[in-house]
Amino acid sequence: GMRNEKDKNLVQCLGQKIIIPELKKAPQPKYIHILAASSKAGSLSQFTLSYADMSEQLIIMPIGAWDAVSPMDEIAWYSKYSRTSEADDITKSVKLFHYRIKVADQRHRLASITLPNMPEIKIAGITLEQ
């Protein structure tokens, strides 16, 4: 990330609700793609998809630690070194992982995504696939 304290590159998961705007001609997304990592190994996250009819879909999935890899993780981004508040650490690599969530309800509009309340999980990006 950037060296200035106020320059944030990632979203820390604190249970935020992301509202999906209603677009007249946009089809319902089939998948949600998330680029994320955790600062703790073994983080089991819970995302909630909320639909316009007030129904919900709970997704529980592990989020990989940024400084480790398990056979289940799909590495989406890799750096040979990490950056700390003091300096660059050329001895420690970091990774971000790709996660794909299937939007199960294709009949009702996806209204929001609620992130886990787990500060150790950081998200670099979320995209909707139609």
Image: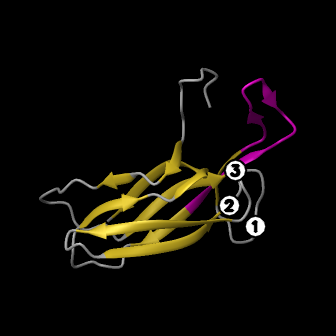
For residue 56, which quarter of the picture?
bottom left
Viewer-side residue, 53 vs 64:
53
Three-letter amino acid code at the position of disc 3: Ser
Question: Dot 2: what SS?
Answer: loop
Label 1: how many Cα within 10 Å (few below 14, some 14–19, many 20+): few
| Residue at mark 1 | 70
Task: Read off the magenta span.
Answer: 79-98
Label 2: how many Cα within 10 Å (few below 14, some 14–19, many 20+): many
Q: From the top left corner, tell me how far across and down residue 111 is, in percent.
A: 26, 62
Left or right, residue 28 beside residue 39: left
Left or right, residue 68 beside residue 28: right
Label 3: how many Cα within 10 Å (few below 14, some 14–19, many 20+): some
The residue at the point 79 percent across, 44 percent down is 93
Q: Earlier in the sequence, mark 3 or mark 1?
A: 3
CB-based contact (under 8 Å), mark 2 and mark 1: yes
Image position of 122 with respect to 115: above or below: above
The residue at the point 25 percent across, 68 percent down is 28
Q: How many marks?
A: 3
| Residue at mark 2 | 64
Viewer-side residue, 19 vs 103:
19
Task: Measure how far apart labels 3 and 1 are at the Cα level.
Answer: 14 Å
Task: Measure how far apart labels 2 and 3 are at the Cα level.
Answer: 8 Å
| Residue at mark 3 | 39
- Does the magenta segment cover residue 3? no
Three-letter amino acid code at the position of disc 2: Gly
Three-letter amino acid code at the position of disc 1: Ser
